[in-house]
Amino acid sequence: MKTHDKIAKVTLVGAGPGDIELITLKGINALKEAKVILYDALVNEELLDLAPSAVKIFVGKRKGFKAFSQEEINQLIVEKAFVYGHVVRLKGGDSFVFGRGYEEIEYVKSFGIPVNVVPGLSSSISVPALAGIPVTHRGTSNSFFVLTAVLADGSLNKEIEVAAQSSATVVVLMGLSKLAEIAEIYTAKGRSEEAIAVITNGSLPSQTSVVGTIRSINAIVKDQTISGPGLIVIGPVVELLKDGHENDYLLKLINN
C-alpha cells in the first residue's frame, strides 16, 4: 500500500439527523482538520463546505444503489488514512445506532490506526422531539424501543412483534416501506386504535409529520403521498401533539 509521510488517524463523526446546526462542535472541529472525508447518503452535504481543501468521497447507500460495499468502505478508510493522514468517516445520525460504525472501527484498529469517536444526535430521539413528540413523558410512557424496520436480507424485523406487546413508546427507523406490515402486527395484537406518527425528512425544512391511528395511517400516508427517509413513532406520546405541542418543524399534522 502506497504511503506518504503522514500520521494516519481516523475520526468517526455522527452528523446528526440532517440539519447542519445539529452536528456537535467537536464534529465540526474534526471536519475542519480532515484531509479526507468519507460520507454517507443521509449526511447534509453542506457540512462538507467546512473542509474546502479535503478530499471528499461519497460512500453512501440509497435504495437500489450502493456506491461501495461495506468491505470496500473499510478498505478505503485505511488506505486514505495511510496516504493522507486524518480521515473523517462522516455518518448520519449517530454512528453506533444502525450505522455499522463499530464494524469500521474494528477494521481500522486492526491496522494499528488510532480512532476517535464523536457521537452524533440520533434521529431516533431528535426527530420525534422536533415534531413535538417526547419519546418518554411522565405518566404516559416510561421507556422506549428503538428498532430498525428492515433487516440485512430485506425482511421485517421480527422484534417489532415484541415491541408491539409493550406499553413503551416504539420508534422505528427506516420503516416507511414496512408501514403496512407494522400496522398488521399491531392490529393482530388488538391495538388498531394506537396513535402513530410518520415523520419524513427529519430536521430539514421539508420535514413532514402525519398522525393517525394504526387503523388509519396507511390510508393517510398514501393520500398525502408521503415519501423520503421516514421514522415512525407509536404510542400514547403521539397524542400529545393534539394538545398543541408542535413546533415550527411540524409542517403537516393530520389527526384521524
Image (cartoon, rainbow, N blue to C red):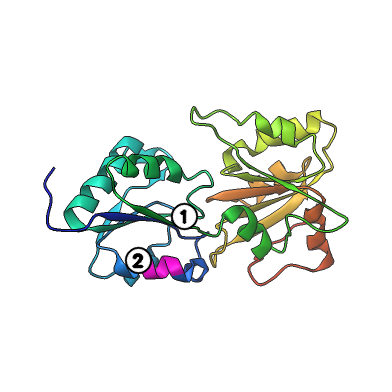
**Foreground label between 1 and 2:** 2
Left or right of 238, for residue 224 = left
Q: Residue 167, position in %: x, y?
A: 82, 42
- As rendered, which of 63 and 11 lies closer to the eye? 11
Left or right of 144, for residue 167 = right
Q: Amino acid at mark 2?
A: Leu
Query: Would you say residue 4 sits in the magenta stretch?
Result: no
Dividing the picture into quadrants, the one containing residue 182 is: top right
Q: Residue 124, position in %: x, y?
A: 62, 52
Q: Residue 174, position in %: x, y?
A: 56, 44
- As rendered, which of 201 and 215 lies closer to the eye? 201
- As rendered, which of 102 and 237 lies closer to the eye? 102
Q: How far is the residue under mark 1 from the one under mark 2?
A: 14 Å
Q: Mark 1 or mark 2: which comes first in sequence?
A: 2
Q: Residue 50, position in %: x, y?
A: 34, 71
> Circle 2 is placed at which residue position?
31
> Circle 1 is placed at which residue position?
92
Residue at x 77%, y 41% (from the top left corner): 214
Answer whether residue 67 is visible to the viewer in this image. Answer: no
Name the element at disc 2.
Answer: helix
Local packing at callout 1 (Cα closer than 10 Å; few below 14, some 14-19, many 20+) is: many
Answer whether residue 175 is visible to the viewer in this image. Answer: yes
- Whether tag 1 and tag 2 are in contact, CB under 8 A, the answer is no
Q: Main secondary structure of the magenta part?
A: helix
What are the residue bounds of the magenta stretch?
26-30
* Outermost residue to the front: 112
Q: Which mark is residue 240?
A: none
